[in-house]
């Protein structure tokens, strides 16, 4: 029994060892993301241990069985070496996934899930980009390498004495311990005896929404999303009759003015968050041309992205789909639903439709999305005619200067009216600059600053060409960003700022479409806004709002809770009730939670949000996002 006791003691030491390791990695994650979190408490870290233990006991179930199973065969040198390696293998791979978020959290604002960690939508890109990642973030890879060595080196071990004797009494005790250990493993892995197993959303019990990534760990988020397609459940906050009273997604742009078949050009700029637009952020922006264009345009100062990654932005801008599924719409089970996308609507009005993306075909599944959305043609790297290697960045695709030039010439070849969208790439990691332009643009204080200036220059060349074409004055240009850039080190972004993007409407033939609007507007508002501007005379279903409307409901799904902006209020809703409320116009850092002082406002806002979510969820589930 002495050896069995030693085996149990060794197991406990090893489980404690890996628990401490998870906590140390949480602290290291915080160091790398120091500017992302404020007002941390001890509860954030204590609560995190619960999520750590859940992962540890699930991933170490074979180790626990191996240490507690009755019998003297466990005490041989071969068996102990085998189980030392099993312990190492069972933990190191999961532990290392935390290192991904040391970097990737800058771009997503959340702990990585299985879809993100396996590069869902970016399967083809990752091989080419990995060397660039290793070069740029070499210090993280070095720390990870040292960690794998040190973790193995200090795994606890105990020397056993070889013995074959055991009494029936000892055997009974060992069986009892084995059964208790197995049951405990399942219970702790489940997260306790509560009604439902521990979920990512439960992190809200230990931190305010902004700080829940500190409570969570990356392995837990991966395990909870392996093999799962995000299936929405019908919401039943209200009866159908009451829901119809509270909210309707049907938009009817009744107008006495006939439909104006202007060309529509939508330009989505990679990572051009509001922090990069020097018109609104002079300290960090680098966009002299875009600044000048804004003075001739209708510029929405309070523009919001509907996600933190590119694959979220395209369905939001083109099809008006909010990113509140918890998974990218493009890769969801609802990707083939009928929607009121720009191409589907405008093709019926005689428009030629096309999608341009400078990356190689298959990148982020945009070519597949273009087909689903109803575009006539897709133009990627494969369709780019000039095979000059100097036009390629060597990792991703065609530099913006050359691809926007190609885009402009193709527009000239199209029969009017046309609807066309282009997605730039050069201001995306690894931020490669064309050799002929190295040293021409200010490098600033960030890794992306130089490429922002280059893309702005490329955009200027495109407009210099476009304004000489006969289609130019008959075109509405819509310019936005897919999402923000990673936060500059030493600069704190509130949740509001992490989603702030420019939204610009420019019509060279309309001097009245000009000025700076203070209205809240998001990417899904672009579709109804453009249709309203064109005096479109048919009904559509849209969860966005026209720019002409005063009341807008901005919504995102962040760290397993709904985040919404309604009028001056920033709301965090957990699916049942509002748990945080801020007046963000007066409290941009979201520090003063009004949850205990604004009961009447909370009731009103909660009703609006529930009606919106119930309508969207149920229509998406029933594939009824179109009128006919």
Image (spheres, grey):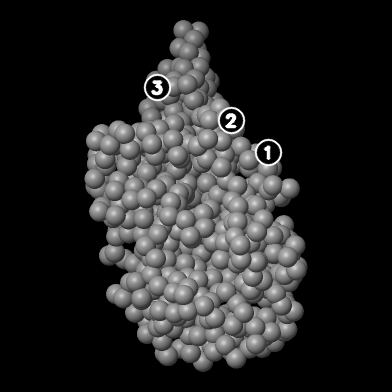
> CB atoms at circles 2 and 3 under 8 Å apart?
no
Q: Is residue 453 left or right of residue 494?
A: right
- Image coordinates for residue 395, horizontal then vertical, percent: 58, 74
Q: CA distance from mark 2 to mark 3?
A: 63 Å
x then y, percent, for residue 316: 56, 57
Helix, strand or loop at disc 1?
A: loop
Residue that mark 3 sits on: 5
Which residue is farthest front? 256
Q: Is residue 41 visible?
A: yes
Q: Earlier in the sequence, mark 1 or mark 2?
A: 2
- Look at 45% across and 71% down and name the residue there: 298
2 vs 3, front mark: 2
Q: Toward which corner of the image does residue 600 lie, by quadrant?
A: top left
Please name the residue that numbered disc 2 is placed on. 240
| Residue, disc 1 | 622
Q: From mark 1 to mark 3, how far is it between C-alphas?
A: 58 Å
């Amino acid at each position: 029994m002495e050896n069995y006791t030693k085996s149990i003691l060794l197991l406990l030491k090893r489980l404690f060892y890996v628990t401490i390791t998870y906590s140390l990695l949480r602290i290291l994650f915080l160091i790398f993301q120091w500017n992302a979190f404020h007002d941390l408490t001890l509860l954030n870290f204590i609560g995190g241990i619960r999520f750590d233990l859940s992962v540890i006991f699930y991933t170490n179930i074979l180790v626990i069985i191996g240490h507690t199973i009755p019998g003297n065969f466990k005490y041989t040198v071969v068996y102990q070496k085998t189980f030392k390696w099993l312990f190492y293998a069972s933990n190191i791979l999961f532990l290392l996934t935390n290192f991904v978020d040391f970097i990737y959290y800058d771009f997503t604002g959340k702990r990585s899930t299985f879809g993100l960690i396996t590069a869902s939508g970016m399967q083809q890109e990752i091989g080419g980009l990995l060397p660039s990642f290793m070069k740029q973030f070499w210090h993280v890879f070095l720390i990870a390498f040292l960690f794998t060595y040190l973790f193995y080196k200090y795994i606890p071990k105990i020397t056993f004495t070889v013995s074959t004797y055991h009494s029936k009494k000892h055997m009974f005790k060992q069986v009892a311990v084995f059964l208790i250990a197995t049951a405990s493993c399942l219970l702790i892995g489940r997260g306790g005896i509560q009604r439902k197993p521990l979920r990512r959303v439960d992190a809200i019990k230990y931190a305010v929404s902004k700080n829940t990534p500190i409570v969570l760990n990356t392995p837990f988020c991966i395990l909870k999303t392996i093999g799962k397609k995000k299936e929405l459940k019908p919401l039943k906050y209200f009866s159908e009759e009451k829901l119809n009273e509270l909210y309707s997604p049907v938009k009817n742009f009744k107008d006495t003015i006939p439909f104006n078949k202007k060309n529509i050009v939508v330009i989505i700029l990679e990572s051009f968050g509001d922090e990069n637009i020097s018109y609104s952020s002079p300290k960090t922006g680098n966009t002299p041309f875009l600044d000048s264009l804004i003075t001739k345009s209708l510029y929405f100062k309070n523009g919001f992205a509907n996600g933190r990654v590119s694959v979220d932005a395209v369905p939001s801008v083109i099809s008006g789909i909010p990113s509140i599924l918890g998974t990218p719409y493009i890769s969801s089970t609802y990707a083939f639903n009928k929607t009121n996308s720009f191409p589907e609507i405008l093709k019926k009005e005689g428009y030629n439709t096309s999608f341009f993306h400078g990356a190689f075909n298959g990148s982020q599944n945009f070519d597949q999305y273009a087909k689903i959305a109803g575009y006539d043609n897709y133009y990627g790297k494969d369709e780019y005619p000039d095979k000059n290697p100097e036009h390629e960045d060597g990792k991703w695709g065609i530099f913006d200067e050359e691809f926007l030039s190609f885009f402009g010439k193709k527009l000239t070849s199209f029969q009017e009216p046309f609807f066309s969208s282009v997605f730039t790439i050069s201001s995306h990691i690894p931020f490669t600059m064309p050799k002929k332009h190295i040293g021409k643009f200010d490098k600033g204080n960030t890794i992306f600053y130089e490429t922002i200036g280059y893309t702005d220059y490329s955009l200027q060349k495109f407009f210099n060409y476009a304004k000489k074409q006969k289609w130019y004055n008959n075109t509405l240009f819509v310019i936005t960003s897919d999402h923000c850039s990673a936060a500059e080190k030493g600069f704190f972004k509130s949740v509001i700022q992490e989603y702030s993007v420019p939204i610009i409407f420019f019509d060279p033939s309309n001097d009245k479409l000009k000025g700076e609007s203070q209205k809240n507007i998001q990417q899904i508002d672009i579709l109804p806004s453009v249709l309203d501007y064109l005096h479109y005379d048919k009904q559509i279903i849209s969860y966005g709002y026209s720019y002409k409307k005063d009341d807008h409901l901005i919504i995102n799904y962040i760290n397993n809770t709904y985040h919404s902006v309604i009028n001056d209020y920033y709301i965090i809703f957990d699916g049942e009730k509002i748990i945080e409320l801020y007046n963000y116009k007066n409290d941009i850092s979201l520090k003063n939670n009004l949850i205990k002082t604004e009961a009447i406002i909370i009731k009103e806002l909660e009703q609006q949000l529930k009606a919106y979510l119930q309508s969207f969820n149920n229509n998406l589930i029933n594939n009824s996002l179109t009128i006919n």
